[in-house]
Image (cartoon, helix red, strand yellow):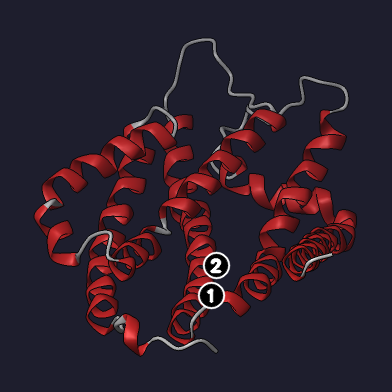
Amino acid sequence: MTDQASSLISHLIELRDRILRALLSVLVVFLCLAYFAHDLYDLLSAPLRDVLPENASMIATDVATPFFAPFKLTLVLSFFIAIPYVLYQIWGFVAPGLYRNEKKLVAPLLVSSTLLFYAGMAFAYFVVFPIAFSFFTGIELNSVVISTDINSYLNFVLKLFFAFGISFEIPIAIVLMCWTGMTTADSLRQKRPYVVVGVFVVGMLLTPPDVISQTLLAIPMWLLFELGLIIGGLYARKKPTDEQQEVP
């Protein structure tokens, strides 16, 4: 067996091991949270239940939904909680092939991207949900009683969590584009009017068809774009030349 083939096999084995560790971390967190699955769903549904009219309640339209919906939430939450360890496994796999200056950039980006994703989810739960649900439940229709299916509600909020979590990664994307030379902060500033229109279009596509959710997503995206311009400009100016790069 040649050295090249042996190296490839060793890399594949390491990749397999790190994937298994990442999956195991999600499983361990899930097993720890499974006992509290129903409590976690109660916590998730609180923003809607707090604004429901007195004669309204959440319902289950399928006989198995009360059992599966809380565990579905727990599984997704387990992945969210295990993200730092999953990213650590990714970092451990790619780090040996990075230059020293690349390590100095990638490590903070992994940490900041995780924190931004959590921040996006927190913003959705504490800011968007109370406002949006108050608006929805405040619309009265004759002879219509609000009874939201618990599985439909879960799918709805998970979609918003992903939308806000991913959207809050905008500064990371801008820093990477500036650092790799794909674009510059000055070039992106010149495109600001198009970006403002674009974030509202993205807000329309990623959120439910209501103006409140769209606006509450678009405005933070625009502010994060401005933050990304500032940080991206700093990283672009500090980017070393190829001659300054050295293999660890």
Which secondary structure, mark 1?
Answer: helix
Instruction: Identify which residue, 74 or 43, lies in the foreground.
Output: 74
The answer to whether 241 is drawn above or below residue 55 in the figure is below
What residue does disc 1 label? Answer: 111
From this view, report whether residue 179 is shown above or below residue 156. below
Given the current orientation, which residue lies at the most extreme front position? 2
Q: Report the front residue among 241 and 90.
A: 241
Residue 46 bears which disc, if any? Answer: none
Spatial CA distance of label 2 from label 1 is: 5 Å
Question: Tags 2 and 1 in contact by the CB under 8 Å rule?
Answer: yes
| Residue occupied by mark 2 | 114
Q: Amino acid at mark 2?
A: Thr
Corner quadrant of residue 70: top right
State left or right for residue 111 relative to residue 226: right
Q: Residue furthest top?
A: 143
Residue 244 on image: x %, y %: 34, 89
Residue at 53%, 71% (x, y): give it.
110
The quadrant the C terminus occupies is bottom right
Residue at image position (71%, 31%) is: 151
Residue 131 position, x and y percent, is: 42, 45
The residue tagged with tag 2: helix, strand or loop? helix
Q: Is residue 49 left or right of residue 202?
A: right
- Towards the viewer: 152 or 42: 152
At label 1, which amino acid type do we have?
Val
Q: Position of residue 220 (x, y in %)?
A: 32, 56
What quarter of the picture does the N terminus occupy? bottom right
- Above or below, comparing residue 157 to residue 88 in the picture: above
| Other-residue count near label 2 (Cα within 10 Å), few / some / many at <14 / 14–19 / ≥20 | many
Asked where in the image residue 66 lies, by quadrant, the reply is top right
Q: Position of residue 208 (x, y in %)?
A: 44, 31
Q: Is residue 246 left or right of residue 192?
A: right
